[in-house]
Amino acid sequence: MSVAHQIDPVDELSPNDLAAFWLPFTPNRAFKKRPRMIARAKDLHYFTPDGRAVLDATAGLWCCNAGHARKPIVEAIQKQAAELDYAPSFQFAHPKAFKLSNRLAMMAPADLDHVFFANSGSEAVDSALKIALAYWNVKGKGSKTRLIGRERGYHGVGFGGISVGGIVNNRKFFGGLLTGVDHLPHTYNRAEQAFSRGEPEWGGHLADELERIVALHDASTIAAVIVEPMAGSTGVLPPPKGYLKRLREICDKHDILLVFDEVITAFGRLGFGTAAERYGVVPDMITFAKGVTSGTVPMGGVIVRKHIYDAFMNGPEHVIELFHGYTYSAHPIAVAAGLATLDLYRDEGLFERARAMEGEWADAAMSLKGRRNVADIRTIGLVAAIDLDPRPGSPGARAYDAMDRAFHDHDVMIRITGDTIALSPPLTIGTAEIGSLFDRLGKLLDGLD
Ligand SMILES: Cc1ncc(COP(=O)(O)O)c(C=O)c1O
């Protein structure tokens, strides 16, 4: 290797060489052979570098609920970057962090009224699990250390999140994970639930499996149960009727904390500020991320009930109550984006709008029933999943093809997990775009072998 090469290797590379970027959750070699590149976004559309408009049927990764590049959010971010670029939240704070906390506390039901900030859903989940463990410690019940998740659950990619999560590929490569974890069964049964709109009639009884887990381990060893109210990343599994209420009852009975991971379901995705509100069930903690800034700036966090916060407010006042936090907890630019986003959701009534569109959305999605390779369709809020029959011997290949062709040939961004297509458009989607989306998907499915 020449000396000149060592001094300035960048000169040797094309600035757009695809080699260096290791894309997350992506088959890198396939992507780099046929990249799906996005250069710009506005409202319901992405734009490719050559200017082609691609309908965003996934709100990015379930996060851009207000649509893209919305002016009030963009301006708030720009203004904040110039006014206060960064301030620590350890021992100091900036005023807007309190304002956003209060706004989130107002949005959350009942006495979920204290907010701990992180920067992603994964950090939000790990924060919630740590708060649960520390809570029982400060309450003098340090034997309550077990965490209960659910099969097919997704709680991000931290070690805590993958331990309570239940997606096999996200776990099996990463060693022993947290100890003392157990899992509820997932709630999907195609024979009983196929083509359900909203909450399936069948499956509420599966919450009783928590009684079996409690009987096995004893409640004195269990700190918390964590579930997504609607399991999103595994391929959209809406909660069966009565399931979440029953989980709450069993947790109450045995003095176990209940955490709703609302990283996807909060901020209007199911037509309400939170799924907790939609289902009339009050968990002890709610994790959030994504929609809080409509995906513009990374932010996540945990909203906790009063009794949890209060339990920590003991001991000498100069001593830190919870030894946990992130350099970027309540980052000023994320906070400013969050405040502008919540204003926009309120001013445009986007949660109510999602609720009003739910029936129309479900009708349009269900119109794909009977198309080639469609094995099941599920809808809830502004979410839909389409299960495709896998190609024999090549699971996931059919859906991968669907996603690739949707982008290149039908100008639509869709998301896939296994052989399931998942749709979750910005909440601003209207009748015309819904029609156009399912029309394009119908053509896509017709042409897919
Ligand atoms: C329910 C749930 N929890 C946690 C996460 C992880 O969020 P992040 O990717 O921001 O770490 C996700 C992401 O999709 C999620 O759906």
Image (cartoon, grey):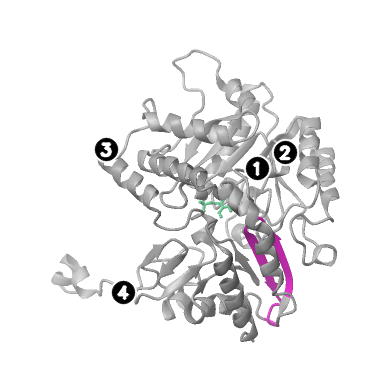
Residue located beneath label 4 in the image: 17
Q: Nearer the viewer, mark 3 or mark 4?
A: 3
At label 4, which amino acid type do we have?
Asp
Task: First in sequence, mark 1 or 4: give its number.
Answer: 4
Residue, disc 2: 281
Instruction: Give the extent of the magenta segment.
Output: 375-393
How many residues crowd around disc 3 within 10 Å: few (fewer than 14), some, or many (20 or more)?
A: few
Q: Residue at x 50, y 34 (%)?
A: 103
Label 4: how many residues lie within 10 Å, few (<14), some (14-19) or many (20+)?
Answer: few
- Which one is earlier in the sequence, the residue at label 2 or at label 4? 4
**In the depicted view, which residue is nearer to us: 413 or 394?**
413
Q: Is mark 1 in CB contact (under 8 Å) with mark 2?
A: yes
Q: What's the magenta bit mostly, secondary-structure-wise? A: strand
Query: Position of 96 compared to 269: left or right?
Result: left
Q: Evaluate if marks 2 and 4 touch, with contact meaning CB atoms under 8 Å apart.
A: no
Q: Inspect this view and state whether residue 24 appears.
A: yes
Q: Nearer the viewer, mark 1 or mark 2?
A: 2
Q: Is residue 251 magenta?
A: no
- Mark 3 → mark 4, Cα distance in angstroms: 36 Å
- Mark 1: amino acid: Phe
Above or below, comparing residue 97 to residue 216 in the picture: above
Q: Is residue 418 placed above or below 257 in the rendered structure?
A: below
Residue shown at 78% from the left, 52% from the top: 240
Q: Report how far apart the C-alphas of labels 2 and 3 lie in the structure.
A: 40 Å
Q: Nearer the viewer, residue 67 or 430?
A: 430
Whichever of labels 2 and 3 marks the residue nearer the N terminus, that label is 3
Query: Is residue 324 visible from the viewing direction of this image?
Result: no
Task: Judge whether residue 391 is colored magenta.
Answer: yes
For badge 3, the amino acid type reads: Glu
Coordinates of residue 120 in the picture (x, y in percent):
49, 47
- Does the Cβ of the disc 1 residue fall within 8 Å of ligand 1? no
